[in-house]
Image (cartoon, rainbow, N blue to C red):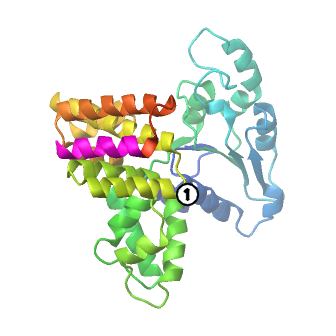
Amino acid sequence: MEYFIELLNSLKRGVIAPVYLFHGEEAYLREQAVLRFKEYLLEGGPSEFNFDLIEGEQATPAEIAAKAEMPPFIAGKRLVVIRNPAFFKAGKGSSGGRAEEGGDEPVSKGKEAALLDYLKRPLASTCLIFTTGEPVDKRRRLYQAVKKSGRVVEFAFLNRRELTRWLAQRARAAGTKFGPGATELLLDVAGPALLNLVAELEKLFCYTAGRELITPEDVRMVCPSRVEENIFAIVDAVGERNCRKALTGIKDLLAAKEPPLRILAMLSRQFRLLLQVHTLQGQGFPPAEIPARLKIHPYVAQKIGNQCRRFNRSFLICVFESLSELDLTVKTGRQEFYPALEKLLLELCAN
């Protein structure tokens, strides 16, 4: 949240770069940042003439440069927002050339030339904002040019403490508050993305209108559980050797029309992550390094780390191998999904 607050404070002080790249998974804050820039830069002016919103997947770098080079109408500043630009993406086929030599860089650089030239001397009267939720390649020439001439801001998901504080502020503004356990349950159900949380909050506020407290029961009634949380609950049940609870979780997923093979795949992934985290913990890796090494969200890594305490390494290997074998027998039609998984869970919970 600090990166967002710092960005808005800079805006209020009138410290505005000529070009920005907003990237990262936190879509809600990216959208809010663009909205705040629009309100600040175009307030009181002819906004319909000084604002352009361009879909970056269709626009070429030359077209974007041409828009940015247009002077503002009458006075003030122009705001040009490029949504989902393709040329910051990593991987083969994106139109952005890399700073390193080799490959197809000369062709890509030619396509980007007009925009690269503009970024060397961007107009002070234009604020150009690129915004994307896709991973960006920091080696790209355009990325380096934006970083040199303006600012790059990564919009990462908020951590658990920031999310709890944000939810409390939202509830207070709506004239209510969360009861014990309700905030934690909502975060478990909705995940860390603020767009999801905003949608769930709207439903909760309508459902509890006129009341001063939101309870865990309200969250369960209004907010459907995510598949990922059901998988966590099933694994927890296996760790507790509670077969009834684990099978109830499987039945809930089937009732929600989750395909059996997807359930198996997600269970296998969860136990694979458990085994990987368990191994890294055994090798002495600090908890803070594990998410980056496994390319998972820190909150997910924390939950998996807590689950690891219920299992030993040999048990995790046994479960992972059993699930792989079960996946093969179900795919080849040698076993039916639910009876086979029920038998496996009964055996695991009996150990």
Is residue 341 within the magenta segment? yes
Q: Residue at x 38, y 56 (%)?
A: 249
Q: Residue at x 63, y 10 (%)?
A: 103
Residue 135 vs residue 53: left or right?
A: left
Quadrant hosting residue 91: top right
Q: Residue at x 43, y 77 (%)?
A: 171
Q: Is the C terminus in the top left, top right, bottom left or bottom right quadrant?
A: top left
Tag 1, which secondary structure?
helix
Q: Position of residue 336 (x, y in %)?
A: 46, 40
Q: Is the N terminus in the top left, top right, bottom left or bottom right quadrant?
A: bottom left
* Magenta-highlighted residues: 339-351
Q: Position of residue 123 (x, y in %)?
A: 71, 42
Q: Position of residue 113 (x, y in %)?
A: 74, 24
* Badge 1: residue crowd in 10 Å (few <14, some 14–19, many ≥20): some
Q: Is residue 75 above or below residue 215?
A: above
SS assignment for the magenta stretch, majority: helix
Give the labeled residue for mark 1. Answer: 28
Residue 146 vs residue 164: left or right?
A: right
In this view of the protein, which residue sits in the foreground, 36 or 340? Answer: 340
Is residue 135 within the magenta segment? no
Q: Is residue 271 above or below residue 53?
A: above
Q: Residue at x 52, y 28 (%)?
A: 138
Which amino acid, by three-letter code, is at mark 1?
Answer: Tyr
* Residue 297 seen anywhere in this rendered image of the structure: no
Quadrant hosting residue 317: top left
In this view of the protein, which residue sits in the foreground, 7 or 59? Answer: 59
Q: Position of residue 12 (x, y in %)?
A: 54, 62
